[in-house]
Amino acid sequence: MTTTSGLVEVLKRELKSRGITYAQVARKLNLSEASVKRMFSRQDFTLKRLDQVCQLTQGEFSDLARALAQEEHLVSQLTLEQEKEIASNVRLFLVAVCVLNHVSPDQIVALYEISKPECIQLLVKLDRIGFIQLQPNNRIKLLVSRDFAWLPDGPIQRFFTQHAHNDFFGSRFDRADEYMVVVNGMLSRRSSAAIVTRLKRVAREFSELHNDDARLPLGERSAMSLLVAIRHWELKAFAELRRRKPPYRVHGPLRPASRSPAEA
């Protein structure tokens, strides 16, 4: 991410957190709302305009720069060894997920069969691992970025596959806030890449909403898990019916078999 795009992303989040709309920004800059949307989408800002928009948030350009510098030191993924240590202890894993969800130590103790001393010990372990920074009065600072994700096929993902896969899918997905659909198709590489890009965008939006809602009381939030996946795959029962040697070239035109003169 370039410095300019990073500053614009930080500014967008600050505006959103304060409920400031593009229409309000447009009035501040004496521009149309369409022009402001285009300016943000293209990340086309002069320093003067950046400073003017910062005034709406009651902040300064230097505040954006400091926030960006802090974010650049955060990690979007842990190392294999870090994940192994978290996955090896279910209580440590639970506390790690809780702090990702901005659940305080007191709330963890109230929700789960974990004593206050044990909770603090587990937080100290997460601090040593480099997942959080445990500050005075047991305040927690996450050391992972807003787009943090577990390693693909890493210890946490394998833990899910082994222990939570059936539990996760043990639902009819018929609630208003649930959704699951299975779509089969045949796509070109270009189309597959386009879908992957859109799915990544959905995952980013989930993370942004998660961070926005962290300001709400715990009673107004509930644990949600988003599973996003696309892969080259065919049902095993179908694959077993495939001919080992197709009678024609799959990628070429169909041609009748040539006959010898004796067969003519």
Image: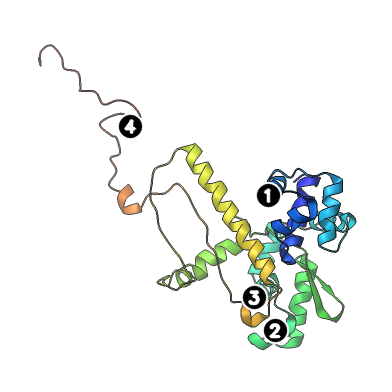
Point out the frontmost of discs 2 and 3: 2
Pointers 2 and 1 in contact (C-beta within 8 Å)? no
CB atoms at circles 4 and 2 under 8 Å apart? no
**Residue nearest the observer in this picture, 33 or 257:** 33
Q: Nearer the viewer, residue 105 or 161?
A: 105
Single out the mark in the foreground, 3 or 1: 1
**Residue 234 position (above or below residue 244):** below
Does residue 160 appear to the left or right of 145 in the view shown? left
Q: CA distance from mark 3 to mark 1?
A: 40 Å
Amino acid marked by disc 2: Gln
**Mark 2 to mark 3: distance in Å?**
13 Å
Tag in front: 2 or 1 = 1
According to the picture, the residue beneath numbered tag 4 turns out to be: 250
Indicate which disc residue 37 carries: 1
Amino acid of disc 1:
Lys
Which residue corresponds to mark 3?
Answer: 94
Question: Label 1 crowding class (10 Å Cα cut-off): few <14, some 14-19, many 20+?
Answer: some
Residue shown at 55%/68% (left/top)? 225
Mark 3 element type: helix
* First of labels 4, 2 by sequence position: 2
**Circle 2 residues within 10 Å: few <14, some 14–19, many ≥20:** few
Residue nearest the viewer, comparing 85 with 76? 76
Query: What SS does tag 1 mark?
Result: helix
Quadrant of res 166: bottom left
Q: Kindly report the distance in space between the C-alpha atoms of the residues bearing marks 1 and 4.
A: 48 Å
User: Can you tell which mark lies on residue 107?
Assistant: 2
